[in-house]
Amino acid sequence: MLLHVIARGKIARSPEAELVARYEKRLTWPVKFTELPETGGRIPDPQTPYKTVLLDERGKDISSEKLAETLERWRDDGMRECRFVLGAADGHSEEERREADLLLAFGKATWPHLLARAMLAEQLYRATTIIAGHPYHRSG
């Protein structure tokens, strides 16, 4: 299953970009990062069937194990792509929230957009290592 991170705004050369690249290299699952401008831009058509996860401060604060369990179930159910969407500064519309398969939050705090992208990359790596039974999760 393709893990597709779709984010508004450019990460450019930054410490956060280095973190994202570090986890992207470590991921053994197919992964793709798509950057869109703050407004507009075209999101590529998904591989179907697919699931959509919105990063949203009003979303569920789930454990790494629960995220891994969800990804594993979706993969085993035949999903070809799982999209993780980070919105612009104003967040997501009510319609986008309703249509999403999961609203995910990294706690109750509000995180800078670039840091949230790095945190997501790490959590995707962690989830895939949990699924694979790799020791990274226990040593982290």
Image (tube, grey):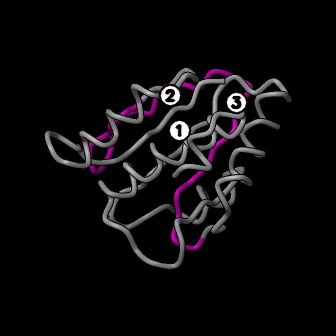
Residue underneath mark 3? 132
Q: Indicate which disc, 1 or 3, sits on the residue closer to the N terminus.
A: 1
Residue drawn at point x = 53 percent, y = 48 percent? 123
Instruction: Measure the C-alpha gap from mark 1 to mark 3.
Output: 11 Å
Residue underneath mark 2? 27
Q: Quadrant of the N terminus?
A: top right
**CB of mark 1 within 8 Å of CB of mark 3?**
no
In percent of width and height, residue 7 lies at 38, 45
The amino acid marked with disc number 2 is Leu
Q: Which label belongs to residue 93?
A: none
**Is 73 rendered above or below residue 104?**
above
Residue drawn at point x = 45 percent, y = 26 percent? 32
Residue drawn at point x = 66 percent, y = 52 percent? 100
Magenta residue span: 33-58
Q: Is residue 110 left or right of residue 135?
A: left
Nearer the observer, 9 or 21: 21
Residue underneath mark 1? 125
Nearer the observer, 22 or 40: 22
